[in-house]
Image: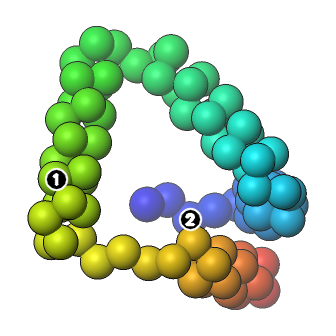
Amino acid sequence: MAQMTRKVAKLLDEALMLPLEDQETLANSIIFGLSCEAGEDVQAAWDAEIKRRLSDIRSGRAKMIPAEEVRRRLAERLRNASR
């Protein structure tokens, strides 16, 4: 994954402070915008990846991390990235 610029890190930090519903709306808007740019082969690859991940979750192969822990880790990364 590419290194975040300060501008992107700041935007992400601000986005993570939004209410959860607003975060979901923002994330969906970004993902939808990216998927509109992608070809059908990319969409098919994403569909396959989603199915694989759901299978891993349902079978117990995937280790789930609570959302609050994910947010804590992201906030820590952002603090470290802006130094």
- In the rendering, at what x and y percent does residue 29 appear? 67, 30
Dot label at residue 3: 2
- List x then y, in percent, for residue 3: 56, 65
Secondary structure at numbered mark 2? loop
How far is the residue under mark 2 from the one under mark 1? 30 Å
* Left or right side of 33 for 21: right
Mark whose residue sits in front, 2 or 1: 1
Quadrant location of the C terminus? bottom right
Q: Residue at x 31, y 23 (%)?
A: 43
Q: Nearer the viewer, residue 1 or 18?
A: 18
Name the residue carrying label 1.
55
Against 54, is 4 above or below? below
Residue 83 left/right relative to 67 = right
Crowd around label 1: few <14 · some 14–19 · many ≥20 (10 Å)? few
Please give left or right for residue 74 compared with residue 63 in the image: right
Q: Looking at the image, can residue 60 be seen?
A: yes
Would residue 74 be visible to someone looking at this image? no
Q: Which mark is residue 47?
A: none
Q: Residue at x 68, y 45 (%)?
A: 24
Residue at image point 34% right, 14% down: 39
Query: Tag 2: Cα neighbours inside 10 Å, few (<14), some, or many (≥20)?
Result: few
Indicate the amino acid at tag 1. Ser
Q: Classify residue 12 by image quadrant.
A: bottom right
Q: Earlier in the sequence, mark 2 or mark 1?
A: 2
Locate residue 23, reporting x and y percent.
Answer: 74, 50
Amino acid type at mark 2 = Gln
Q: Secondary structure at mark 1?
A: helix
Q: Are marks 2 and 1 in contact (CB under 8 Å)?
A: no
Instruction: Report the front residue among 18 and 36.
Output: 18
* Residue at 76%, 84% in the rendered image: 79
Give residue 22's quadrant in the image: top right
